[in-house]
Image: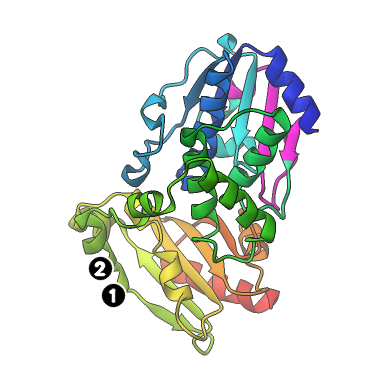
Amino acid sequence: MIKDIIAAINKGENFLITSHIKLDGDALGSELALYLTLIESGKKAVVYNEDQTPGHYSFLPAAEKILHELPDVNDFDVAFILDCSEIERVGDKAKEIAKIKKIINIDHHISNNGFSPLKLWDGQASSTGELMFRLFKQMNISMTPEICTNLYAAILTDTGGFRYASTSKDTLWVAGNLVEGGANPQWISENIYESDAPAKIFLLKKTLETISLDMENQVGSLVVTKKALSEAGATYEHTEGFVDILRSVKGISISVLYTQLDDNLYKLSLRSKGKVNVEKIAKMFGGGGHVNAAACRIQGEIETIKRDILKAVRETR
């Protein structure tokens, strides 16, 4: 399949690159690495994202090139859909993007629905960034420090700083190659993890007041409300990392972050330790992801949603 993707790149002239809403480091790093690779190969490329780039990823090379208004899709030969298990995840323009004659999906989510026959998919890979590295190696391109920086950021963030179970010896070998190619681990980590806005700290303070420990302290949860966001002067991007706080507590096997999107609509981010499969739980509510990291959206009152999630946890254990 990689050979077919390389053939499509060689034949194509104009490329659209996009990823999912609620952008993370893997999505952005993979997009920008591909963009730089295509541009340096003499191709034309555009990175389009529905959502704005979170502030702590604005340092990534070529981040300023990202567009948030979709150009005419008739201008593109090929569309790359990165880090998406289904095309709808790109947002409101999904149907329009789907009109592009050749769609290439590069993804590592086990919940991938196979929406594109031309794909590079590996549910065991740590990140889409790791898959991009495989592709670039097969292309025999010379990866610049800028490309290496983007890929390192992608892998770093989707492995939780190389802590998650998806981190394999291959993942670490790839990371080592990226450092050798010019990625600076300290500088990248400082920009991502040590550049929080004061609003995020104030939001965290309010969110910690919602801590709930259930099922004999095995399931921990936090709730981010629209009210808390407003009072802290924060945005949804400032919730990144909150779900991992309770997973760090001894005895907790599942942590859940309930983020209020509307009056009766919540986004759930689920994390787990060891072999506890939260992807199964998310899938029960129309979501998906990985064994140890998944997400879904549920409509309803928060207390009802929390009861339904705890019931689902019991049923899947």
Which residue in the protein does label 2 denote?
Answer: 206
Relative height, residue 292 to residue 89 (above, below): below
* Marks 2/1: CA–CA distance: 6 Å
Q: Is any part of residue 20 visible from this angle?
A: no
Q: Position of residue 38 (x, y in %)?
A: 57, 21
For the residues bearing labels 2 and 1, Cβ distance under 8 angstroms = yes
Magenta segment includes 270? no
Which residues lie in the magenta part? 97-120
The amino acid marked with disc number 1 is: Glu
Relative height, residue 131 to residue 10 (above, below): below
Name the residue: 58% across, 14% down. 43
The foreground one among 229 and 178 is 178
Name the residue: 54% across, 20% down. 40
**Left or right: 91 with respect to 53?**
right
Name the residue: 28% across, 53% down. 195
Please, what is the dominant secondary structure of the magenta stretch? Answer: loop
Which residue in the protein does label 1 denote?
Answer: 209
